[in-house]
C-alpha cells in the first residue's frame, strides 16, 4: 500500500470511510448500493480538480436538507501532511480548515483522470466534418479496438483532425479528433472517391470502448485513473477483454487504476479485488483489499439472481421516467392487480433499442422474462414511411424495416413524446404547474408566467417540428429550475414527469389507454 489516504466522514449517509490508495495496478472495486463508490470517485477527482467537492456535494438552500454541517473530507499523504475540507455555508463551498495543499500534491501522481458513466464516456464528435486529410488512427488504438471488441473492422480505424492539434496537449484532446471507418468507394465527377462513416454511427458500446481506449493511450505514465461502472453497454466478453487490456496498459505505464462495478463477470476475473463493506448499524465502511470474489458477490449475486418478471427497453432517460410513471398510474387505477417485478433500461436511439431487444435473449435474460421495447411516439412516423416506400427502400432501410417487422409483437409506443407531453401540460395548465412547483419548492417563489416568458425568449419557436421545439423548451425549463433550486436536473425532470402523468392519466379516456397498453402485457408471462 502507498500510505496515501482519503478519509470521508459524515458525507451522504457514510459515517466513516478510510480509503488507502493502493500501489500501481488495476483494482476492481465493488459494493452494495449506497456504500460510497460514487462518493469516493468525487474525492479522487479532487486530487486534480479544485471544484470537485462543490460539484458533487451540494448543500440545498434549506439548511436541514442534504446538510453537510458535520462533514469532513481529509487527504493524508504518505509524507505525513494532510488537509481537511469542510463545507462553508457563507461561501456555499468546500474549504480547507488548514491550507496545506502540498498534502494533495504529495500523493505523487503525474495526473489524475476520472471517467464517470456519462461525460467523457459517451462523448462523440459534434463538429461537422467538412473535409480534410483522413489518416490512419494510431496503430496502438487500432489494435486495441479490434482486440477488445473482437472485430477486425477496427484495425482499419481512421481519424481526421478538426481542431488545433499544435501546442501542448493539442493532439491529446478528444474533441480535436473525429474517428472514421472506411465504407467503400463511389464514382463522382469522373473520379473515384473513398467514402466513410463517422463515429456518430458507432454503437454505444463501441463509443464507450473508443473513449476509454483513447484515454489509456494519452494518459501520462505514473498516473491515477478511476473508471465508474466499466461494464455499462459492454457485452460480458468485451468487459473481460477491456479489463485485460487495461491491466496490460497499466503495467506499461505504471498506472494505478480503480474500476467500480456491479458486474459479476469483472468481479470473478479480477486479480485485485476491493470490497467496500457497509455496516448498517453505524454506516461505517470497511475496506477489504485483495479479497475473494465470494465476499463481494454476497451482495451483488443477490441483485443479479432476483431477476425481474418484465424488462422494458427505452431510448433515453426521458422515456424511462415517463414509462415508469405510466406503469405506476396503471397499477394505481387497477389496485386489485398484483404488480410484478419490472425494470426499465435506457439503451440509446430507437435503432439501438431494436437491435438490443433482438439480441438480448442470447446472453442476458431468461426467456420467461417478458421483454418489450417502448419507443418514442415519433418513431411511428419512421415505420409509416418505411412501409410506404415498400420495394423502393434502400438496403439500410430494409435492414431497419426488418428490425421493426421481426419484432412487431415486442414493440410498443409511448402515448406521446415525453417532452412534448410535459410541455403541453405545463403551458396549457398554468395553475396546476404553479401548484406543483409550490409543492416541490415551498421555500421559493417562482412565477410561472415569468418563467414561460423567459423560456420563449431563450428558445423561440424556430422549429417547424413541435416535438423538437418541446424538447428544447422542456430542457431549458429543467436547467432553469435546477439552477434556481440547486436540485439535480434528473430529479427536476422526474418531478415534472410525475406531475404530468398524474394529471394526464387521471382522465377516464387516458385510463383506458393505459389499460389497452399494459393489460395485454401484464396478463401474459414471458416472451411470445
Image: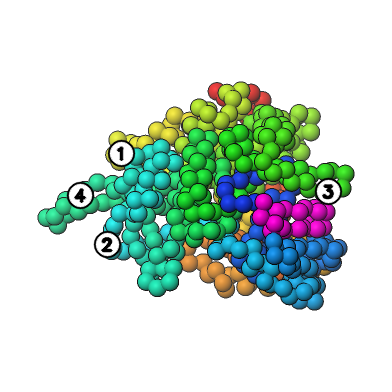
Residue shown at 62% from the left, 41% from the top: 272
CA–CA distance between discs 2 and 4?
Answer: 18 Å
Mark 3 and mark 1 in contact? Answer it, CB < 8 Å.
Answer: no
Q: Which residue is mark 2?
A: 133
CA–CA distance between discs 3 and 4?
Answer: 64 Å
* Residue 168 screen position, x and y as percent: 43, 71
Residue 478 versus residue 39: which sits nearer the camera? 39
Spot the residue most to the front. 79
Q: Secondary structure at mark 1?
A: helix
Quadrant occupied by the C terminus: top right
Q: Specify few, some or many for label 2: CA neighbours under 10 Å numbering under 14, 14-19, or 20 or more.
A: few
Residue 309 sits above or below residue 141 on the image: above
Q: Which residue is mark 3?
A: 283
First in sequence: mark 2 vs mark 4: 2
CA–CA distance between discs 3 and 1?
Answer: 57 Å
Q: Which residue is mark 1?
A: 395
First in sequence: mark 1 vs mark 2: 2
First in sequence: mark 4 vs mark 1: 4
Amino acid at each position: 500500500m502507498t500510505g496515501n489516504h482519503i478519509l470521508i466522514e459524515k458525507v451522504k449517509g457514510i459515517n466513516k470511510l478510510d480509503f488507502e490508495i493502493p500501489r500501481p495496478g488495476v483494482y476492481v472495486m465493488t459494493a452494495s448500493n449506497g456504500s460510497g463508490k460514487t462518493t469516493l470517485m468525487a474525492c479522487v477527482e479532487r486530487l486534480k480538480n479544485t471544484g470537485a467537492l462543490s460539484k458533487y456535494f451540494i448543500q440545498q438552500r434549506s439548511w436541514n436538507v442534504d446538510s453537510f454541517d458535520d462533514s469532513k473530507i481529509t487527504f493524508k499523504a504518505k509524507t505525513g501532511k494532510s488537509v481537511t475540507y469542510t463545507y462553508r455555508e457563507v461561501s456555499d463551498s468546500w474549504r480547507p480548515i488548514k491550507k496545506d495543499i502540498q498534502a494533495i500534491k504529495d500523493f505523487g501522481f503525474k495526473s489524475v483522470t476520472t471517467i464517470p458513466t456519462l461525460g467523457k464516456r459517451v462523448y462523440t464528435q459534434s463538429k461537422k466534418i467538412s473535409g480534410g486529410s483522413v489518416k490512419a488512427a494510431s496503430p496502438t488504438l487500432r489494435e486495441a479496438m479490434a482486440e477488445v471488441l473482437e472485430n477486425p473492422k477496427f484495425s482499419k480505424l481512421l481519424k481526421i483532425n478538426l481542431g488545433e492539434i499544435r501546442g501542448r496537449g493539442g493532439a491529446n484532446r478528444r474533441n480535436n479528433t473525429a474517428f472514421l471507418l472506411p465504407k467503400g468507394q463511389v464514382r463522382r465527377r469522373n473520379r473515384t472517391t473513398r467514402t466513410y462513416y463517422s463515429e456518430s454511427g458507432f454503437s454505444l458500446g463501441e463509443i464507450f470502448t473508443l473513449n476509454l481506449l483513447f484515454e489509456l493511450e494519452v494518459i501520462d505514465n505514473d498516473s491515477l485513473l478511476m473508471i465508474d461502472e466499466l461494464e455499462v453497454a459492454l457485452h460480458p466478453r468485451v468487459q473481460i477483454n477491456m479489463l485485460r487490456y487495461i491491466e496490460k496498459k497499466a503495467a506499461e505505464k505504471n498506472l494505478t487504476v480503480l474500476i467500480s462495478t456491479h458486474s459479476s463477470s469483472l468481479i470473478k476475473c479480477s486479480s485485485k479485488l476491493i470490497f467496500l463493506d457497509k455496516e448498517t448499524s453505524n454506516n461505517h465502511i470497511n475496506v477489504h483489499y485483495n479479497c475473494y470474489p465470494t465476499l463481494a458477490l454476497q451482495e451483488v449475486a443477490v441483485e443479479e439472481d432476483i431477476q425481474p418478471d418484465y424488462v422494458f427497453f427505452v431510448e433515453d432517460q426521458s422515456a424511462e421516467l415517463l414509462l415508469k410513471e405510466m406503469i405506476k398510474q396503471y397499477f394505481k387505477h387497477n389496485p386489485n392487480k398484483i404488480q410484478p417485478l419490472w425494470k426499465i433500461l435506457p439503451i440509446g436511439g430507437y435503432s439501438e433499442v431494436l437491435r438490443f431487444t433482438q439480441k438480448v435473449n442470447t446472453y442476458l435474460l431468461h426467456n420467461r422474462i417478458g421483454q418489450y421495447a417502448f419507443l418514442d411516439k415519433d418513431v411511428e412516423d419512421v415505420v409509416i414511411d418505411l412501409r410506404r416506400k415498400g420495394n423502393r427502400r434502400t438496403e439500410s432501410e430494409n435492414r431497419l424495416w426488418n428490425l421493426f417487422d421481426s419484432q412487431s409483437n415486442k414493440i410498443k409506443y409511448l402515448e406521446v413524446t415525453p417532452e412534448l407531453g410535459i410541455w403541453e401540460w405545463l403551458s396549457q395548465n398554468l395553475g396546476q404547474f404553479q401548484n406543483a412547483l409550490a409543492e416541490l419548492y415551498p421555500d421559493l417563489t417562482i412565477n410561472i408566467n415569468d418563467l414561460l416568458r423567459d423560456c420563449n425568449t431563450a428558445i423561440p419557436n424556430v422549429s417547424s417540428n413541435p416535438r423538437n421545439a418541446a424538447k428544447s423548451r422542456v430542457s431549458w425549463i429543467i436547467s432553469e429550475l435546477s439552477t434556481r433550486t440547486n436540485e439535480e436536473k434528473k430529479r427536476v425532470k422526474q418531478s415534472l414527469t410525475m406531475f404530468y402523468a398524474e394529471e394526464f392519466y387521471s382522465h377516464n379516456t387516458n385510463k383506458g389507454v393505459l389499460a389497452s397498453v399494459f393489460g395485454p402485457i401484464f396478463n401474459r408471462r414471458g416472451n411470445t
